[in-house]
Amino acid sequence: MKTFAVIDQRAEAEHAGLDLRQTVLVIFGNPKAGTPVMAAAPLSALDLPLKVLIWDHNGQTKVTYTSTAELARRYELPADLAANLAAVDALTTALVSA
């Protein structure tokens, strides 16, 4: 698993003179897992690498992402390719329980 970027969207908004609740986007993935998915379903590159949004909602931390099942449905992935994306489920489960 590789972290490609962590974007502090609140800080970027502040640089532009705007206010935004605490919002961080984490972009991550595994090229060995994602490349076969993109080769089979080129439009999946719109959702890959995987992303997790961590944001504040009235003092409560929220974690939002597109589930493996939704990505598999959206791109009509066979089970073996859908399994390549399952890392997001394990990562978000660990993140939420931390």
Image (cartoon, helix red, strand yellow):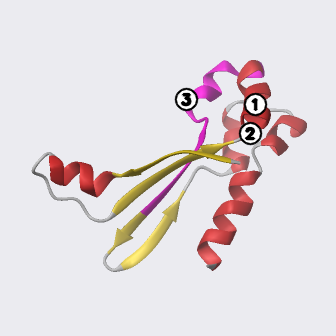
Task: Report if the CB atoms under discs 2 and 3 are less than 8 Å apart.
Answer: no
Q: Which mark is residue 72?
A: 2
64 left or right, relative to 10: right
Residue 17 appears at what percent x and percent y? 9, 50
Q: Amino acid at mark 1?
A: Glu
Residue labelled with disc 3: 46
Q: Is residue 58 above or below residue 43?
A: below
The quadrant holding residue 45 is top right
Q: Is residue 29 above or below residue 18?
A: above
Task: Report if the CB atoms under discs 3 and 1 are less than 8 Å apart.
Answer: no
Which is more toward the observer, 77 or 11?
A: 11
The 10 Å Cα crowd at callout 3, few under 14, some 14 to 19, many 20 or more, is few
Q: Which residues fall within the magenta stretch?
A: 40-54
The 10 Å Cα crowd at callout 1, few under 14, some 14 to 19, many 20 or more, is some
* Residue drawn at (75%, 19%) of the image: 39
Q: Amino acid at mark 2?
A: Ala
* Residue drawn at (74%, 27%) of the image: 35
* Residue drawn at (71%, 58%) of the image: 89
| Quadrant of the rendering where the C terminus is positioned | bottom right
Q: Which mark is residue 76?
A: 1
Comes first in the chain, label 2 or label 3: 3
Q: Amino acid at mark 3?
A: Leu
Label 1 residue SS: loop
